[in-house]
Amino acid sequence: MSVATVNKPRARDRQATKEALMAAAVTVIAECGYEGATTRAIADAAGCSEALIQRYFNGKEGLLLAILDKEEDRSDAALFLGRPLCSSLAQEAREMLAHSVEKISERSDRIRIVISRALLDEAFKARFNRIWIREDVKSGLESRLARYVYAGMADPDLDIGAAAEMLLSLSFELGFIHRELLQTSADRTKRLLEQFAEMFGRAISAPLSTGRSVSEPGDAPR
């Protein structure tokens, strides 16, 4: 089974080589499976020496963990979660779900790889859980929801942790289960997204009798 060679960086500096190896690993593992993907095949696809996988990543599993712990993913999540509050909780859910569907689509190969490995290898699952970006995203989402409570838009008795978990679960349901596994059409996914967003907004909005008009200083909803 042949795998196309990933574009080779012209300058063989350390970071460019690491990026080439990570890109090649995603391609090779997605095609051959984790067990079938040899370090030789990954190195060949990247146009690099096989020894560099051991030098830079301490082996194939270290390479896989590096793929799953990319700083750009954390930066993207922090930027998205740091945006101004929305004008409604339904709009907050709508933007979160749309962003998640897009990102899950971009990372679907990585998600497939990690699910298959985590189901088969308890040691890998433990190591992956220590670097998984999900907890960072959940924490950032909880902070956003707390600001909606402060602004009087969300129910003051809201279980913020449960609400964040609900939104993350809906994101995975739409982005991976529907789009990647069930092959739900884009139009159907969009309709489901709208319905989920409206239901989420209604479920956690502040009762009209207790809603406040104040906003967090310096952070008026847009």
Image (cartoon, rainbow, N blue to C red):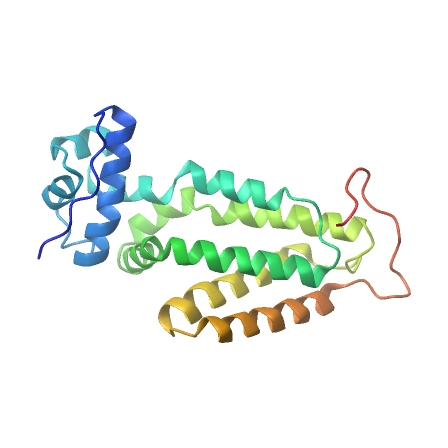
Residue 22 placement, left or right of 189:
left
Which of 188 and 153 lies nearest the eye of the viewer?
A: 188
State the residue at coordinates (59%, 63%): 166
- On the image, the x and y values in percent for residue 42 come to 16, 44
Image vertical order of residue 165 relative to residue 219, above or below: below
**Residue at the extreme right of the image, as rendered:** 209
Is residue 8 shown above or below 198? above
Q: Residue 112: horizontal and vertical position, in percent?
A: 32, 59
Residue 105 position in % (x across, y down): 41, 58
Q: Position of residue 49 (x, y in %)?
A: 11, 32
Query: Is 96 positioned to the left or the right of 40 in the image?
Result: right
User: Is residue 12 shown above or below 8?
Assistant: above
Q: Is residue 90 left or right of residue 29?
A: right
Q: Is residue 166 left or right of residue 37?
A: right
Give residue 50's quadrant in the image.
top left
Q: In the depicted view, which residue is nearer to us: 20 or 60? A: 20
Residue 99 in the image: above or below residue 79: below
Q: Is residue 53 visible?
A: yes
Q: From the image, which quarter does the N terminus lie in? A: bottom left
Residue visible at 29% across and 28% down? 15
Does residue 162 appear anywhere in the picture? no
How many marks are shown on the rendered structure? 0
Q: Residue at (49%, 67%) from the top-left corner? A: 174
